[in-house]
Structures are given as structure tokens and as C-alpha cells.
Image (spheres, grey):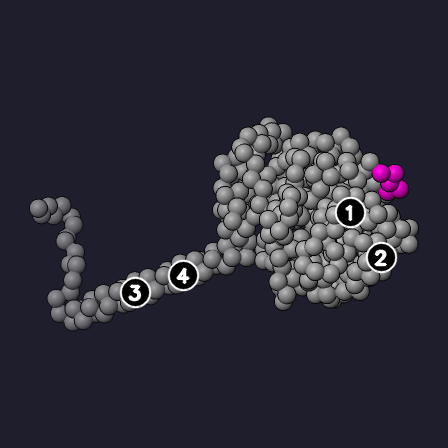
Amino acid sequence: MAFPPRHGYESLPTVEKDDGGEHYTQQRRASRNKRLILYVVTCLALMLTMVSAGRIARSRGFWMTCYGTQRNQSSLARLPSHYTLPSGDKIPSVALGVWQAEKGEVGNAVKTALKSGYRHIDGAWIYRNEAEVGQALKESAVPREQLWLTSKLWNNFHAPEDIEPVLDQSLSMLGTDYLDLYLIHWPVAFKKEGVNVVDEDLTSDPYPTWKKLEELVDKGKIRNIGISNFNIRRIQNLTANPLKYQPAVNQVELNFWNPQPELLKWSKDNSLILEAYSPLGSNKQVGATLGVPEVKNIASKLGVTPAQVIISWHVQRGTIVLPKSVTSSRIVENYEIFEIPQEDFEALEKAATSHTPQRVVNPSEGWGLSFDVFDGE
């Protein structure tokens, strides 16, 4: 529909009919070219943004990207960084565990951990990576007095005469004159010769083994001694003897699927600190752990990752926690712990202790034992 021209105004031509036609065509071409360039630039910008997001996801981990860990961290209350042992020594509450860390990977993991603030490295003779750990410690240049080094006595060396030689092996590989903590790895003694031949005497009565460890404390090669994978019955069997030094810690499998509330309460009542290995669950359980609704809710509420929620929960329970990883971003992430609001902590504790416990680490059958290591629980 055409409107008639108003008085005093002349209709303006939109296109010149003569020599202006070529100029108009050029304008349209230029306009199309500009739009094309703008489209290409926009696409490139979107691609760069997606690549950057991918890098962030890889460097900080999927959960860190989703939950925005930097959002509220500065306002969150911190949990204890150390616990005091009976000796008066202060043990860091979070350690890097190096179990199952392969050769060629464990050294970088240790160096990353130390750069991130870790000072507690939890290892063992049987992990067969102490030499690489020791080299990483040397290259890190962190002063020895700032480090907390843990190793463990393997089953074949419980006989008193075998303990100091294998301890010296660990000291040599780690490049140190002493250990901050040395644990009896399992409450099962094997004879030195043969494959998994049980030493019945030292298994039923570990006191001779313990007495030798006490001697090595007095000798200065060990500062604290403890146990690992001992249930209450086996702890009582040891502590019924006239010990010079009480066990400093008991390192056990502790996680959402195997929270062991009875052992935790008994240990607190008897001034024995628990250390939690496999704190996120076994390798096949980690995904399920991070997907627990209570864990995800707390992570969203606090602006931290689900892994940080679980690791914080362990420390808030009063235990030392030993997360293990060889992935740099996860090592850094796992070290940041925060106090969980009491209501949320209790909800998570209830969820963890309301299902049937699932223990994963039990070598009894694999070792061909005629008994279960955890009998009597």
C-alpha cells in the first residue's frame, strides 16, 4: 500500500537509475563481505572459547568445572592441618598416597604434591616405588624437617632380626636417615622364605615385632610406630602387652561405602588416630562416591568439588586422609579441604552409615589364608 506524499515534501529516490546503479551494487557487495567476515570472526571466537573451556575442564577436572571451586572457598572455615600424636609430633591431616602409583608417574606426582603444599607422603616397601619417591624428594629441595614420611613393614619381615635390614632399605631408597612413621602393614606375618607361608607365632602374637620397632625408635631410625589394617580385636591383642610406645595410628580402609563407625568411635575413645586409605572408594567405586546425592548437594552449596567434600568429611570425622592420584589437577584439588556445615556433615554421615558396608581390600583369599584377616569384627 502506497501513502500519498505530504505537502512540502518530495519523495526521495531509493536507487539512482543511471550511473548510481553500479555504486549501489558495490555497496551491497561490500555489505555482504562485511557480514561474511563478521560471521567468520564470530565462529573463530566461539571455537577458541570452547577450546579454552576444554582446557579448563582437563586441568581442573570435570567436577571442578561444574561446581566452580573458587566461588566460596575464601569464606569457608578450614579444618585441622595437623594432628598431635602421643610423641608430641604433629602429623599433617592430608597426605599423598602412592599406592598403585606406577614407575615413571609417582615421581612427578610427589613433586606436584610438594609444590601444592603437601608435606606428608604415605608409602610402603611393598609399593616398590620408594626409590622414585626418594629421587623426587631430593629434586624438590623441600627441607627434610618439613616433610612427613611414612613407610610400612611388609609381612615377610616381622621376625625381629629381619626388621632393621628392610627398614634400612626403605631409608636408603627414600634418601633419609629416619622415618616419621613406620607401620606394621598387615596383622599377618609370613615366613621370610616361601610364598605366603604364615608364621603362626608372630601372627597370633605380634609383640616381638613391636618390641623391635620400639628399639628402632630409641635408636632414632623411626620417630613414631603404628599399625595398619588392624581391627579392634587385633589391636587389643597387641596392646594387652606392656608396650613402651602405644600405636600412634591405625591405617585402614575408610570411605563412604566402608565408613567403619564402630572402629572410629573405639579409636577415639582409646586415643588412637585412624588414617583413611582409599578415601574415595576403590577405583570402581569413585564414580559412585562422587555421585552420592548428599555429596553433590554439599558440593553445590559450598562451591567445591564432590571429591573435596569427601576428603573434608574424612578430616572432619577426625581421621587423617590419604587420597592418591598421579593427575596433577586432582592432586592439587584434593589438598583443599573445608569445614562442612554441621547439618550437612551429619546428613552425609547418616547416608554413609545407613547402608550395608562394602569392604574392597581383603587379601585373605588371595594369600590362601585359612582365616579372614578381619575375623572378629
How much space separates mark 3 and mark 4, taking CA atoms? 17 Å
Q: Nearer the viewer, mark 3 or mark 4?
A: 4
Q: Is 354 within the magenta?
A: no
Residues marked 2 and 4 touching at CB (< 8 Å): no
Q: Which residue is mark 1?
A: 201
Residue 277 coordinates in the image, percent (x, y): 65, 46
Q: Which residue is mark 3?
A: 36
* Circle nearer the N terminus (2, 3): 3
Q: Nearer the viewer, residue 69 or 192?
A: 192
* Circle nearer the N terminus (4, 1): 4
* Circle nearer the N terminus (2, 4): 4
* Circle nearer the N terminus (3, 4): 3
How much space separates mark 4 and mark 1, taking CA atoms? 68 Å
What span is colored magenta in the figure? 241-245
Q: Nearer the viewer, residue 279 or 40?
A: 279
Q: Which residue is mark 2?
A: 161
Residue 203 coordinates in the image, percent (x, y): 75, 46
Residues marked 2 and 3 touching at CB (< 8 Å): no
Residues marked 1 and 3 touching at CB (< 8 Å): no
Residue at the image point whose x is 72% and y is 35% from the top: 233
Q: Nearer the viewer, mark 1 or mark 3?
A: 1
User: Circle 1 sits in a helix, a strand or a loop, which is it?
Assistant: helix
Question: Does residue 290 appear to the left or right of 232 in the view shown?
Answer: left
Q: Nearer the viewer, residue 22 or 87?
A: 87
Question: Does residue 33 appear to the left or right of 290 in the view shown?
Answer: left
Q: Amino acid at mark 2?
A: Glu
User: Circle 2 sits in a helix, a strand or a loop, which is it?
Assistant: helix
How much space separates mark 1 and mark 3, taking CA atoms? 85 Å
Characterize the local packing of mark 1: few (<14), some (14-19) or many (20 or more) Cα atoms within 10 angstroms. few
Residue 195 coordinates in the image, percent (x, y): 67, 59
